[in-house]
Image (cartoon, rainbow, N blue to C red):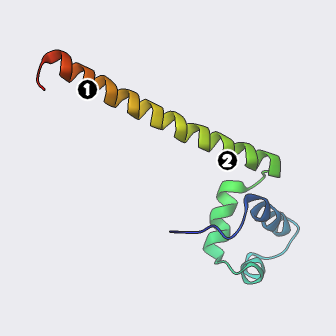
């Protein structure tokens, strides 16, 4: 399973170093990641503060929980319709 090596706080500090003028190539070498990874992080976390990243993580977890509840509800609904129709 894929393991995250950097926390969101570390990612934001790395991106802030880029904003201060450190090149992407230099940041990639210092942190042991590819330039592509840095560009992907930049697309996701650019302009964020640490508190905003924590809030984003909380919202993503809540969204996943709500999606799971909706899927379970839809499954229960389908099962009840099948029982009512007498096809079981």
User: What secondary structure is found at the residue carrying circle 1?
Assistant: helix
The location of residue 8, given as percent across then percent down, is 73, 59
* Circle on res. 44: none
The location of residue 13, given as percent across then percent down, is 83, 64
Q: Which dot, 1 or 2, sits closer to the camera?
A: 1
Where does label 1 land, which residue?
A: 79
Where does label 2 land, which residue?
A: 57
Quadrant housing residue 77 = top left
The location of residue 30, given as percent across then percent down, is 78, 82
Q: Is residue 5 left or right of residue 85?
A: right
The residue located at (65%, 58%) in the rendering is: 43
Given contact means CB atoms under 8 Å apart, are the residues at marks 1 and 2 in contact?
no
Instruction: Work out whether residue 56 can be spotted.
Output: yes
Depth order, front residue of 87/28: 87
Q: Quadrant of the C terminus?
A: top left
The location of residue 84, given as percent across then percent down, is 19, 15
Depth order, front residue of 40/73: 73
Instruction: Tell me the crowding category of disc 2: few under 14, some 14 to 19, or many 20 or more residues within 10 angstroms, Cα based.
Output: few
Instruction: Tell me the crowding category of disc 1: few under 14, some 14 to 19, or many 20 or more residues within 10 angstroms, Cα based.
Output: few
Q: Considering only vertical position in the picture, is 68 above or below 79?
A: below
The residue located at (26%, 21%) in the rendering is: 80
Quadrant housing residue 70 = top left
Q: Is residue 46 left or right of residue 68?
A: right
């Amino acid at each position: 399973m894929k393991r995250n090596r950097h926390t969101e706080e570390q990612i934001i500090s790395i991106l802030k170093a880029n904003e201060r003028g450190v090149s992407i190539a230099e940041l990639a070498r210092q942190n042991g990641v590819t330039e592509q990874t840095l560009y992907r992080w930049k697309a996701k976390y650019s302009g964020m503060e640490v508190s905003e990243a924590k809030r984003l993580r909380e919202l993503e977890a809540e969204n996943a929980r709500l999606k799971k509840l909706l899927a379970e509800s839809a499954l229960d609904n389908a099962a009840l319709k099948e029982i009512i129709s007498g096809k079981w």
